[in-house]
Amino acid sequence: MITYDELHNENHKITELSNVLLFLFRERSMCDTETCCELFHRYMDRVKHHIELVDTNLYSSLLTHEDHDIQKMARNFMSGSQEIRKIMSAYTRQWCPRSSADSLAIADHDRFLKETEEMFGLVLDRIQNETEKLYPLVRELAGDMKKVG
């Protein structure tokens, strides 16, 4: 079982990593550093872990709720999770080949920066929606202000 504080802490860490990485990635020479790559892989792992955590712990009670609007919200969040996974997978294939885990493959910095900003923006929008819509709904339905599920 996970707490809302843990979910908020995860969201904070993902947000912090996105902000640091976007700052660093704007400078082309930073993109090739081992430190940036390590931070980037940490970011990707955190986002994947967070999505799995939310998917595993928050939707079951919403999907079986009698209110169809609540069920629809859960399905929309689940669909959003799948879309983020798909985008992250395509992004990783393009910019982070497994053959070089300690470097990114950036031939076109402008395109890399644009796609990175878009992906990070999508994740940050998701985090905001979780915080403003999903967590309050789950709290209200469960009646537990500390623990999820």
Image (cartoon, rainbow, N blue to C red):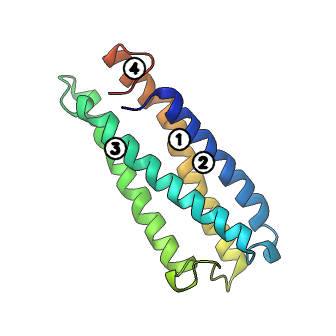
Query: Mark 2 or mark 3, which is nearer the start of the sequence?
Result: 2
Which residue is more in the foreground, 37 or 105? 37
Specify the quadrant that holds the N terminus. top left
Q: In the displayed image of the protein, which residue is found farthest to the top?
A: 143
Q: Which mark is residue 127?
A: 1
Q: Quadrant of residue 135?
A: top left
Question: Callout 3 environment at 10 Å: few (<14), some (14 to 19), or many (20+)?
Answer: some
Mark 2 and 1 residues: CB-CB less than 8 Å, in contact? yes
Residue 14: mark: 2
Determine the residue positioned at 45% across, 51% down.
Answer: 49
Q: Which numbered disc flags the more N-terminal residue, 2 or 4? A: 2
Q: Which residue is mark 4?
A: 139
Residue 138 on image: x %, y %: 36, 24
Which mark sits nearer the N-terminus, 1 or 3? 3
Q: Which amino acid type is shown beneath numbered disc 2?
A: Ile
Q: Is 59 positioned to the left or the right of 13 in the image?
A: left
For residue 64, side relative to residue 133 (left or right): left
